[in-house]
Every structure is written in structure tokens, then in C-alpha cells.
Amino acid sequence: MTPDAALILCRFLFDGAAVFLWGASAYICWIMPADLAAQVGRRLRHWYALATLLIIGTTASHLPLQAATIGDGWADALAPQMLSSILSETSVGQAWIAQVGAAILLVASCLAPVRFRYRVRALSAGLLLISLTISGHAAMNSDWLRTMHRLNHGLHLLSGGAWLGALIPVVVILPMLHDARWQQDARTALMRFSTAGHVAVALVIMTGIINTILIVGSAPLDWQLDYQFLLSIKILIVFVLVALAVTNRYLLVPRLSRNPSLQPLKWATGAEIALGFAVLGLVSVFGTLQPT
């Protein structure tokens, strides 16, 4: 595997783990009823452990992979002078330092009391996502425009991550609609997710449009450039995701009162998750490309 391919894989695993940790933790600690939140948290504990290990592994790997990509290949991955130069002279190094700090906070969340654990976990995962704005395409701007671009990109990541990451707990909650013990709390949690989801989707679209204007300057229609071609595919997938979310909320959920089968809703939610991670895969690739 080339350093470039390894870096893209590392970015994808990091982004996916951070999105899950942020979206699922925010949903559990701020939106779900308390008893249901504790139950869902227990059922997702192995996923949390896996995501935390992925954050640790990808954070540790990211700097050497950047060194190998910027330098002359794998021989420079652990070259002290190359690593030092990246850390002290580039936005990539600044982003990596921020990611290390957020990863340490994430590990510390595992030792926090249960009542604070998901809050600390959500905070650390949110910081992991925000750290991506330091070395992203916003860094090509200067002064106030760079700051505005980073703030907009951060809001884009947090809103999109909240939407996609929360879908994993939604899959856990859906079968509880047929469990008399959890039915009411499950309905409440899903309705709250729907309300928050409307806000998240609106923010994703708004900030995505602003990001595109700031990076490309217009609609990404120059498909001879890999960046704009992949960005166009991402935009198309997001529109499909929005259509699926609208179908879930206004067609499949109301049907539950007449047809108790959860299968269509499960399939639609699973499709949202798959498409969401396809978006992360595209971002991992075109984030390494020149936009114009």
C-alpha cells in the first residue's frame, strides 16, 4: 500500500470513529430519556470501545503517514527531522497536536463517572471533528476569511456528524418500539431525534453550500478535476440522504400506527448509514486533492 492510500484509509477510519462517538454520545446524553439512554449506552459499549481504539490508532498513525506522503515515501515516515518540521511549520502539525489532546480527553472519558461519561465523550469527539478544520482547505485562506471558513466547516462537521452518528443508536432503539417496557421512551427518543435531525440537515445543506463557494468559488462542475467530480458525487449522495430522511419521518414512521412492521424503517435507516459512510469515504479522498 502506498503512503497516499494508507493516509486516505487512516482519515476514513478516524472520521468514521469520530462521527460515531460525537453523534451517538450527543444523542444519548442530551436527547434520549435517561433510562433509555443508559440501556442504549450499555448495548453500544463494544462499539464505543472499538471507536476509541480506532481514534487512538489513527491519531498515532496520522503524523508518520503525513511525513511519508510529504517526503520520499515510507523511508520518511519516522524521520525525526521530517516529523519535527511538520509539527512546527505546518497546519497539519497543529491539527495533529489538537487531535492528540482530544484523544487523551476521550481516553479519560472512559474513567469518568457514568453520569458524566457521555458528556465528556461527546465533548472530546466534537473536538476531534473540529480539529479537522485546522488543516483542511480553510487553511488556504487568510485573516478573517480563514476564521469564517473554519467556523463554517466546523459547524458543517458537527451538524453532519450529529445526524449520521446518531443513526447508530436509532437502529438500537427501533426494536424497542415493540417492547412494552421501553415503547414510550423509544417513541419519545425517535421524535426528538426527528426534530433535531431537521435542524442538523438544514445546517448541513447551508454550511455545505458556503463551503463549496469558499473553496471552489462556484458550483463544482469542472469534472476534469478529481476534487470537483468527487464533490459533485458527495452532493448527490447528500440529496439522496435527505430524501431518505424525509421518507422515514413523513412516510414510514406514520405507517407504524397501521402496520407495526419495522423492516422498512430498518432498511431505510441502514441505507442512510451506508450512504453516510460513503460520504466520509469520498471526503477522505478529495480532502487530499486540490480543488481548482
Image (cartoon, grey):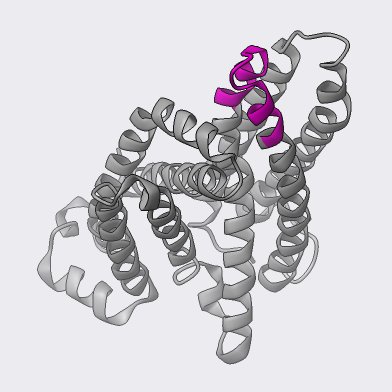
Residue 27 at x, y percent in the picture: 57, 44
Position of residue 248 measured from the top left corner of the image (x, y, whole percent): 79, 28
Q: Residue at image x 67%, y 18%?
A: 177
- In this picture, is 132 found above or below 223? below
Looking at the image, residue 81 lies above or below residue 57: below
Q: Quadrant of residue 181?
A: top right
Name the foreground residue: 219 vs 184. 184
Q: Is residue 18 left or right of residue 181?
A: left
Q: Is residue 27 above or below residue 215?
A: above
Image quadrant where one finds the N terminus? top left
Residue 277 appears in which quarter of the rendering?
top right
Seen in the picture, residue 162 relative to 212 is either above or below; the reply is: above
On screen, residue 20 versus residue 264, left or right, reads left
Q: Horizontal placement of 104 versus 225: left or right? A: left
Q: Is residue 55 left or right of residue 36?
A: left
Write the residue at 31% across / 36% down. 49
The span shown in magenta is 171-188
Q: Is residue 59 magenta?
A: no
x and y percentages locating residue 186 in the rendered image: 65, 28
Locate the C terminus and report the quarter of the image it occupies: bottom right
